[in-house]
Image (spheres, rainbow, N blue to C red):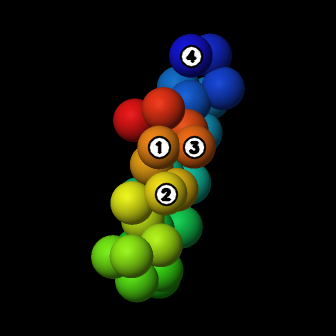
Amino acid sequence: MAQTVAQPTATPVVPAKLPLKAIAPWAVFFGV
C-alpha cells in the first residue's frame, strides 16, 4: 500500500494519457 500512496502524482498523469482499456488492467495492477 505504501507504494500506491507514494505515487499519488503519477496516478492521474499516467492513465490520463492511456486509453480506457489500458487503465483497467493498470488500476488492477496497482490494486486500486
Image position, residue 3 (x, y; %): 66, 26
Image position, residue 23 (x, y; %): 42, 65
Query: Alpha-carbon distance for marks 3 and 4?
Result: 12 Å
Disc 1: which residue:
28
Q: Earlier in the sequence, mark 3 or mark 4?
A: 4
Disc 2: which residue:
25
Disc 3: which residue:
29
Q: Amino acid at mark 4?
A: Met
SS of the residue under disc 2: helix
Q: Residues within 10 Å of mark 3 (few under 14, many from 20)?
A: few
* In front: label 4 or label 2: 2
* Image point (49%, 57%), residue name: 25
Query: Alpha-carbon distance for marks 1 and 3?
Result: 4 Å
Is 3 left or right of 31, judged from the image as shown?
right
Is 6 left or right of 21, judged from the image as shown?
right
Image position, residue 7 (x, y; %): 59, 39
Count the marks: how many? 4
Disc 4: which residue:
1
Quadrant containing the C terminus is top left
Q: Are marks 1 and 2 in contact (CB under 8 Å)?
A: yes
- Tell me, yes or no, if residue 9 can be seen here: no
